[in-house]
Amino acid sequence: MDLNILMPTVSTFFIVLSATLVAFGWRLAVKRKLEQHQKMMVSAAIAAILFFIIYASRTFIIGSTPYNGPDGLKPYYLVFLLFHITLATVAAVFGITTIVLGYKKKFARHRKLGRFTSIIWFITAITGTAVYSILYVLYPAADAKPLFEAIFG
């Protein structure tokens, strides 16, 4: 398996792992097992950081995988991709904010924002997995291209 497939596969694994750990962490918070909750959420954050490092490294060093599916579906894919990118950006900002609020012991705001952030994170992981599936399973492309060329081709 070459890096064009290995890196996206590994990065997708880490974002799904992160969302799974957030789900377990949320459950621990509901059960008031707050020490375990904190450890689980730190693990989720580490998985998300590993995702981002792998994703960014591949994008900047190798390039991005272009959409290789039917031309008639490309506008729908681009709208879906834009939705995913926007949601991922919001989730990252909210995730960092939620973690900071927890460490500053501002628990009321942490709890309120954390619920919303978790839901966005779950949707981001699902849409990210869908993008991965489109680009690498359903319609695999031969080579990576520079970022904007891959998106707008």
Image (cartoon, grey):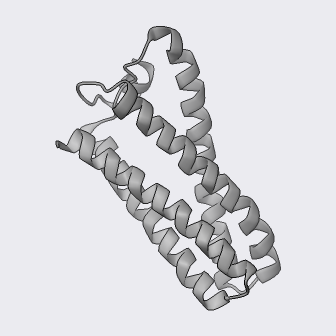
Percent across and percent down for residue 46 are: 45, 70
Instruction: Give residue 59's quadrant in the image.
Output: top left
In the image, residue 44 sits, relative to residue 4, either above or below, namely below
Residue 141 seen = yes
Quadrant for residue 101, please give it.
Answer: bottom right
Q: Quadrant of the C terminus?
A: top left
Q: Name the spot of residue 89 as percent of width and height, x first.
A: 58, 49
Residue under the point 41% across and 18% down: 69
Q: Quadrant of the N terminus?
A: top left
Q: Across the whole image, how many numbered discs are drawn on residues?
A: 0
Q: Position of residue 143 (x, y in %)?
A: 23, 28
- In this view, the residue farthest toward the top is 72
Q: Residue at x 67, y 53 (%)?
A: 120
Locate residue 80 relative to residue 70 in the image: left or right.
right
For the point 30% across and 50% down, the residue is: 57
Residue closest to the eye, 22 or 89:
22
Residue 149 vs 5, above or below: the answer is above
Q: Is residue 5 above or below residue 143?
A: below
At x 77%, y 82%, the residue is 107
Q: Residue 147: tell me if it is visible.
A: no
Left or right: where does residue 148 sit relative to residue 93?
left
Q: Residue 95, image x and y in percent?
A: 62, 64
